[in-house]
């Protein structure tokens, strides 16, 4: 999850800010960096980090904590979205393709959806409510 209104950065850009090639960054600096700064998308192939935390680490300042409370504008991965509304991650992709969810926002290649959009979709799923499904007693 990417907390609302928090810019993110990937390792390529971190290496550039540190003034070293990416290969050097990964070999020499990444282990210590990852001890102090956790990826915002754990379990994902996309390694994204909070920009404020990264800048503080690179400057040798104390690393500020991430917000701990949930916010409607938090950005969720496909897996987090699936877990939130109790569906399979592949269904999230299908919903986005079929228009039941938006295409999402892309940050450094990771497709993300806002928490409020996901909850809105869950609370107002197609086929629920007035006019959804067949009438009681109708047989098919």
Image: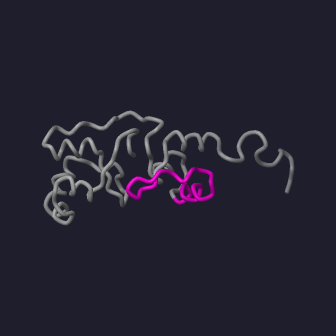
In the rendered structure, the answer to whether residue 137 lies left or right of residue 63 reads right
Corner quadrant of residue 13: bottom left
- Look at the image and tell me in which quarter the C terminus lies: bottom right
Residue 1 x, y percent position in the rendering: 39, 46
Residue drawn at x 21%, y 44% is 55
Up/down of 27 relative to 86, above or below: below
Residue drawn at x 51%, y 51% is 104
Residue 119 x, y percent position in the rendering: 55, 40
Q: Which residues are magenta?
A: 90-111
Q: Is residue 139 magenta?
A: no
In the rendered structure, the answer to whether residue 104 lies left or right of residue 57 reads right
Residue 126 x, y percent position in the rendering: 68, 47
In the rendered structure, the answer to whether residue 100 lies left or right of residue 88 reads right
Q: Name the residue at the bottom extreme.
A: 23
Residue drawn at x 86%, y 50% is 138
Relative to the observer, which residue lies in front, 133 or 59?
A: 59
Q: How is the image coloured?
A: one colour
Residue 79 x, y percent position in the rendering: 46, 53
Q: Name the residue at the top extreme.
A: 69
Total labels: the figure holds 0
Q: Is residue 109 magenta?
A: yes
Corner quadrant of residue 92: bottom right
Residue drawn at x 86%, y 46% is 137
């Amino acid at each position: 999850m990417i907390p609302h209104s928090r810019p993110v950065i990937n390792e390529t850009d971190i290496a550039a800010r540190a003034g070293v090639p990416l290969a050097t960054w990964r070999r020499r600096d990444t282990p210590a960096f990852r001890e102090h700064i956790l990826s915002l998308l754990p379990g994902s192939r996309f390694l994204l980090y909070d920009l404020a935390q990264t800048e503080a680490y690179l400057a040798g300042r104390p690393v500020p904590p991430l917000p701990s409370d949930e916010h409607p504008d938090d950005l969720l991965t496909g897996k987090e979205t699936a877990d939130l509304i109790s569906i399979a991650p592949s269904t999230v992709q299908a919903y986005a393709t079929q228009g039941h969810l938006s295409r999402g926002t892309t940050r450094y290649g990771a497709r993300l959806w806002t928490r409020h959009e996901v909850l809105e979709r869950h609370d107002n799923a197609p086929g629920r409510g007035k006019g959804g499904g067949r009438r009681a007693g109708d047989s098919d």
